[in-house]
Image: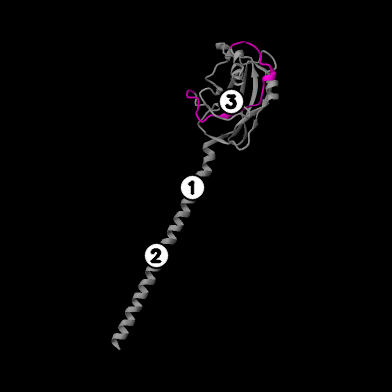
Amino acid sequence: MEYSIGKRLSSLLFTGAFISIFAMTSCNNSSKGKKEDKDTTVQKGDTENLAARTFKLHRYKLTKSQLDTLLNDNYCKEIKFFFYEINKNEFSLRAVAEDGNENQRGYTVNLSIEPNTDTLFSIDANRNAQYLTRGALKGLWNLNGERGKPTRIDPANHSNIILVPLGKLEPKTNSVMFAVFVDGVQILITAGTTITNPSPPAKPCEEYQGCDL
């Protein structure tokens, strides 16, 4: 009889110890779960703070009709693009033609935004005015025989163009730049791709006779 009671007591003690171990394990797992939830909240917070450390640009379209307006006489030797804010830390572009000496010719036009082309830049990057010379446009439209000649581009050669933000900045001023493409062609940046000139450091093209080069 004493043996039977002792055996039962040992069994009860073993069962109690097992239950205690199981309860401790469950508590530990619960604590781990809570820690993971905390980490997720921190990551979400970092994502929200991203907006405060960046600004948003897009791809922009300048239409043939707008170019007809901008380049309507021989005094229009380069196009100036400048930024304006459309939402908090989000920018679009306006364009105006100049005579090569920073004198405005004609009206300002707003470029349209290409959908689903968000590009984020560090808030430390500069948004300097961008220039595209008449010579660069001649090269873009394969009018290489006209380059270097102080002649107006025939409007029949105008087409929609797309400005694409470059991933690298202008090294002297830390300014954004854009690659320029004829609308509809493959967006592929190569050594021969037309690039806007941010100002500064770019000077008016008449100062170095570069308006049509």
Looking at the rendered structure, the kind of residue marked 1 is: Gln
Q: Position of residue 198 (x, y in %)?
A: 55, 22
- Distance (Cα) linking label 3 and label 1: 37 Å
Q: Find disc 3 in the rendering and name its residue.
A: 180
Q: Describe the element under mark 1 as helix, strand or loop.
A: helix
Q: CA distance from mark 1 to mark 2?
A: 28 Å
The residue labelled by disc 1 is 43
Q: Residue at x 58, y 25 (%)?
A: 180
Q: Is residue 142 above or below residue 149?
A: below
Nearer to the camera, 88 or 18: 18
For the record, the magenta segment spans: 148-172
Main secondary structure type of the part rendered in magenta: loop
Which residue is rendered at x = 51% and y = 47% of the image? 44
Q: Residues within 10 Å of mark 3 (few under 14, many from 20)?
A: many
Residue located at (52% from left, 44% from top): 47
Q: Is residue 159 a member of the stretch shown in magenta?
A: yes
At 60% from the left and 28% from the top, the residue drawn is: 163
Query: Label for residue 25?
Result: 2
| Amino acid found under the numbered disc labelled 3 | Val
